[in-house]
Amino acid sequence: MAEIRVSMRQVGPSTSEAEIRGHRVLVDRPLEKGGSDRGPMGGELLLAALGGCFLSNLFELIRTRNAPIHEVRLEVVGTLEGTPPRYTAIELVVGATTNEPELLAKFVAMAERACIVANTLKSGIKVTSRVRVATNGKP
C-alpha cells in the first residue's frame, strides 16, 4: 500500500494553501461565494486532477509509441446536481491533430483505464474525517 499526502494550511480568511511534493497551490472561493478568489475551488481542482492524471497517461502512451498525435487538448466537464451538491457526471473531451483517429481513441481508452483519479471516482471511495486538537500551537 502506498500513501500520497497533501498538506494544507489556512493562508487567508477563505484561502488555503496545498503543499504537494514542494509545489504550492492556493484554493479559494470566488468573490460571489464569499471568497477572495485567490485560486480555484476544490471542486474545480478535482476536475483538474482528473484531467492531469488522464493526460499524463495519454502523453506517455503517445511518447512511448512515437504516435503521430499532436496538439492534444482536453476539456473536463463536470455536471453538478443535488443537495448537497456533487458531480453526477464528468466527461473528458479529447481533441488532437492526427491522421489516425482510431489510434487516438484506443489511447484515450487506455489512458482512462490507467488513471488513478478516474479509477477512484468510478469505484467510489469512502471519505472520512477526524479531528486533531492543537496543543502548544501544534496540531
Image: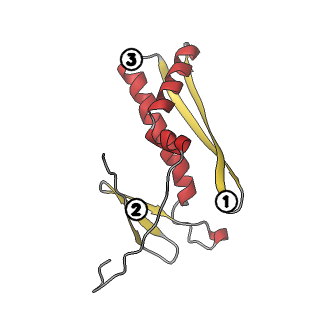
The amino acid type, in three-letter code, at marker 1 is: Pro
Which residue: 56% across, 21% down?
A: 105
Work out whether 68 lies above or below 81. Answer: above
Mark earlier in primary sequence (3, 2): 2
In 3D space, how far apart are the residues under numbered discs 1 and 3 (Cα atoms)?
41 Å
Q: Are marks 2 and 1 in contact (CB under 8 Å)?
A: no
The amino acid type, in three-letter code, at marker 3 is: Arg
Q: Is residue 98 left or right of residue 137?
A: right
Q: Position of residue 12 (x, y in %)?
A: 47, 76
Residue tagged 3: 65
Work out whether 3 lies above or below 53. Answer: below
Residue tagged 2: 18
Viewer-side residue, 34 vs 97: 34
Residue tagged 1: 85
Q: Position of residue 39 (x, y in %)?
A: 51, 62
Q: Secondary structure at mark 2?
A: strand
Mark earlier in primary sequence (1, 3): 3
Which residue: 41% across, 24% down?
A: 61
Q: Is residue 139 left or right of residue 117?
A: left
Q: Is residue 62 left or right of residue 3?
A: right
The amino acid type, in three-letter code, at marker 2 is: Ala
Q: Position of residue 77 (x, y in %)?
A: 64, 43
Which numbered disc, 2 or 1, marks the residue closer to the eye?
1
